[in-house]
């Protein structure tokens, strides 16, 4: 770690070129550049990324699809069909990860059922039902960070064409056995590695009926004061080609990326906060966008095969996801991972072959979300991105607090100040700080400067023309998420 290297990671000429070209815009599939650290990423994370096994993911997707249906209202007594059998199987896979890890005591991996009674809603819940989330909790090894919770979520329920039909076959391979399989593999891999903070892997039910499992869990978490710092929701992450032919140009493009959706202005912001956001030009610097950029930089730093395409929107149109449940309940750092292209002949469809008019010709079309459409190597790459992001989040120091753009008078330069994290967030872990900057029209941070172990920095950049943030780093090279610099008169 070069704690005394007072330099920009991206040179002035390269920065000007990147700015003119739009840098790593949120609509492309190339790696982010500029603020990505120049040193090697932590070895512990690189090792974990290599351990993700595509063959295991293939098996998990096939097993989940083999339960026939995982509809929230489906059979709970059968051992081999329905949502009851599926959740029991998920819990057993989590338990296997717990036993293989050999973690003991306060660091022992816990497998939990999180059950909620949901009454008929006149829409998709036709009778009272127990909506049961399955959790794998990997406690942090650092007592000072253990109460910080970093979630990866995926719903394990499925539906077919009629959303209240609990009996029809609904294999739900891509939507969302793929995300559930990723959680199971993450449990196996992450439980074997050092994590300062706690990672929670949660397979939710009731998503297809209205995010019931996630909403009830988020509501309870808020009521109990849980410190949920970030949520990575994985939903439909296994079929990159979508409606395009495998081997074609579109499929090759989509194979290299996964969309990461993020909310802009936090939905629970007060009127005063919204005014401050508009005044400072912070519309793209809420906690969800900050998390999305963090995921993007982790992917670029590790040079992963699948890089995030940042979508500055909370979700797709006419669709919803479990990350929104956390946003609604005051946990503003939540994002969604989804393939670049979706095939709507497969999603929420009865399994069937039907003749369809395609360009004036009647052709046989296979409907249904079948496991054959899931590409395990791609799913493994998305799982690797999740593993890297979660390990960086769990092991990084907490961000600085009260990061501010000093506004004592008119000037062309920029003065930044910040405070260390709260004492409960183990500020002793911090080895130094980096200032990150971007132009006001850039979607991502474009450059970073190591300023060492200090709480202020002066830059020869106009505060009117740039956006600024500060992140902490530790001796192992982990970087915190960015703390945005808010203008303050002082």
Image (tube, grey):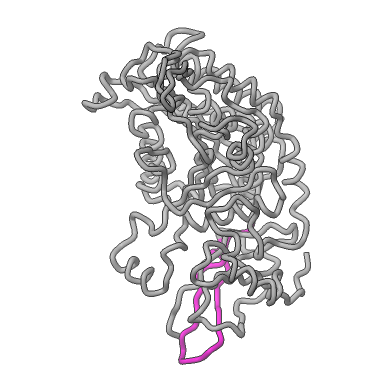
Name which residue lies at 78% across and 68% down: 2
Bounds of the magenta span? 396-423
The x, y position of residue 447, in whole percent, is 64, 69
Figure quadrant of the N terminus: bottom right
The x, y position of residue 160, in whole percent, is 39, 20
Figure quadrant of the C terminus: bottom left
Q: Quadrant of residue 46?
A: top right
Residue 106 visible in the displayed image: no
The x, y position of residue 488, in whole percent, is 44, 80
Q: Which of 417 and 175 is in front in this view?
A: 175
Taking the magenta stretch, the answer to whether it contains residue 270 is no
Residue 345 visible in the displayed image: yes
Query: Going by the picture, which residue comes out furthest to the left?
Result: 122
Q: Which of 240 and 387 is in front in this view?
A: 240
Name which residue lies at 51% across and 9% down: 80
Name which residue lies at 50% across and 76% down: 404
Taking the magenta stretch, the answer to whether it contains residue 416 is yes
Q: In which quarter of the image is residue 77?
A: top left
Q: Is residue 76 above or below residue 374?
A: above
Q: Nearer the viewer, residue 236 or 388?
A: 236
The number of numbered badges drawn on the structure is 0
Query: Going by the picture, which residue comes out furthest to the bottom?
Result: 410
The x, y position of residue 389, in whole percent, is 62, 47
Q: In this view, does 151 lie above or below 427?
A: above
Q: In this view, does 241 lie above or below 312?
A: above
Name which residue lies at 74% across and 61% down: 475
Q: In this view, does 461 lie to the left or right of 233?
A: right
């Amino acid at each position: 770690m070069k704690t005394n290297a007072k330099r920009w990671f991206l040179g002035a000429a390269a920065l000007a070129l990147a700015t003119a070209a739009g840098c790593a815009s949120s609509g492309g599939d190339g790696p982010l550049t500029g603020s990505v650290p120049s040193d090697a990423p932590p070895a512990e994370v690189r090792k974990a990324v290599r351990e993700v096994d595509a063959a295991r993911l293939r098996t998990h997707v096939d097993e989940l699809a083999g339960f026939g249906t995982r509809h929230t209202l489906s059979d709970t007594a059968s051992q081999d069909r329905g949502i009851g059998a599926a959740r029991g199987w998920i819990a057993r896979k989590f338990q296997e990860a717990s036993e293989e890890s050999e973690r003991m005591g306060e660091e022992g991996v816990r497998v939990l059922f999180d059950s909620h009674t949901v009454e008929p809603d006149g829409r998709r819940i036709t009778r009272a039902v127990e909506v049961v989330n399955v959790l794998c909790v990997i406690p942090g090894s650092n007592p000072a960070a253990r109460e910080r919770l970093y979630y990866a979520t995926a719903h394990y329920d499925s539906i077919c064409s009629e959303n209240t039909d609990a009996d029809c076959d609904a294999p739900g391979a891509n939507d969302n056995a793929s995300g559930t399989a990723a959680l199971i593999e993450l449990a196996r891999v992450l439980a074997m590695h050092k994590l300062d903070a706690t990672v929670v892997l949660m397979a939710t039910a009731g998503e297809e009926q209205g995010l019931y499992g996630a909403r009830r869990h988020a509501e309870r978490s808020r009521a109990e004061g849980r410190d949920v710092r970030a949520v990575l929701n994985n939903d439909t992450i296994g079929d990159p080609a979508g409606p395009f032919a495998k081997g074609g140009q579109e499929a090759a493009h989509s194979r290299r990326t996964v969309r990461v959706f993020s909310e802009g202005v936090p939905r629970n912001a007060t009127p005063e906060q919204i005014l401050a956001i508009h005044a400072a030009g912070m519309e793209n610097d809420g906690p969800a966008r900050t998390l999305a950029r963090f995921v993007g930089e982790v992917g670029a730093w590790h040079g992963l095969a699948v890089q995030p395409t940042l979508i500055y929107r909370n979700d797709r149109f006419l669709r919803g996801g479990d990350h929104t449940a956390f946003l609604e309940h005051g946990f503003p750092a939540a994002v969604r991972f989804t393939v670049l292209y979706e095939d709507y002949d497969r999603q929420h469809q009865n399994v069937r072959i039907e003749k369809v008019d395609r360009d004036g010709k009647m052709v046989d079309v296979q409907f249904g979300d079948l496991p054959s459409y899931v590409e395990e190597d791609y799913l493994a790459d998305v799982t690797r991105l999740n593993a890297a992001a979660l390990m960086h989040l769990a092991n990084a120091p907490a961000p600085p607090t009260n990061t501010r753009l000093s506004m004592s008078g008119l000037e062309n330069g920029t003065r930044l100040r910040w405070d260390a994290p709260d004492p409960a967030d183990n500020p002793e872990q911090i080895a130094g700080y980096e200032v990150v900057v971007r132009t006001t029209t850039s979607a991502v941070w474009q450059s970073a400067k190591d300023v060492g172990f200090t709480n202020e920095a002066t830059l020869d950049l106009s505060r009117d023309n740039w956006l600024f943030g500060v992140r902490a780093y530790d001796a192992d090279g982990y970087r915190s998420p960015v703390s945005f610099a808010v203008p303050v008169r002082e």
